[in-house]
Image: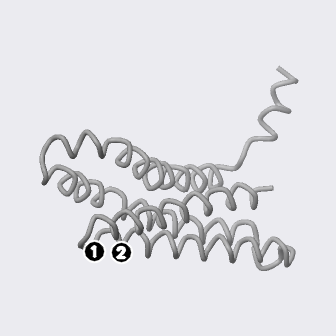
Amino acid sequence: MAGSVGVFAVLASAPTVVRLSLHVLGASVWLGGQLVVAGLLPTLRSMGEDAPRKVAAAFARVSWPAFWLLVITGLWNYAAVHGASQSSAWNAVFLIKMLCVVAAGIGAYLHTRATTPRRRGVFAGVGALATVAAMVLGVALAG
């Protein structure tokens, strides 16, 4: 049993577990959902002209709360790691990540407002790529 004490000593605190779990949950829904819907799109199109729009509307009811959960927990993460006291390089990467988050949100929003398939595709691509970039930069910041 003495060896197990050392294992527990390296576990994250309860607030850290909650904060990071909520952030990962939000990312799972926001990015994972985008990838799943994109993968299902050919099948949805075969189900009728309205099917993709109906699925997109249903996904929006889940994905936008997940996006805001990511924003809130992202700010919580910044405060928890004392971002203001991190190196200038760390803060530069954090700023780029935040720009990616903004681009992801704008891309997704414009995707929902686009009136042509081409524009929907372009804005979906912008939103998804910006989301992936934000995720990768977040992993880098975890250092």
Whole-angstrom CA distance, mark 1 to mark 2, is: 5 Å
Q: Can you identify the residue that label 2 sits on?
A: 110
In the displayed structure, does residue 4 sit left or right of residue 38? right
In the displayed structure, does residue 20 sit left or right of residue 120? right
Look at the numbered disc 2 and give the secondary structure of its residue. helix
| Mark sitting on residue 129 | none
Q: Can you identify the residue that label 1 sits on?
A: 113
Q: Amino acid at mark 1?
A: Arg
Crowd tier of the residue under label 1, counting other residues whose Cα lies within 10 Å: few below 14, some 14–19, many 20 or above = few
Image label count: 2
Q: Amino acid at mark 2?
A: Leu
Contact (Cβ within 8 Å) of mark 1 with mark 2: yes
- Seen from the viewer's position, the closer of residues 122 and 94 is 122
The residue depicted at 56 percent of the width and 49 percent of the height is 21
Q: Position of residue 54 (x, y in %)?
A: 17, 54
**Quadrant for the N terminus in the image:** top right
Q: Is residue 129 above or below residue 37?
A: below
Look at the numbered disc 1 and give the secondary structure of its residue. helix
**Quadrant for the C terminus in the image:** bottom right
- Seen from the viewer's position, the closer of residues 138 and 115 is 115
Q: Position of residue 31 (x, y in %)?
A: 48, 53
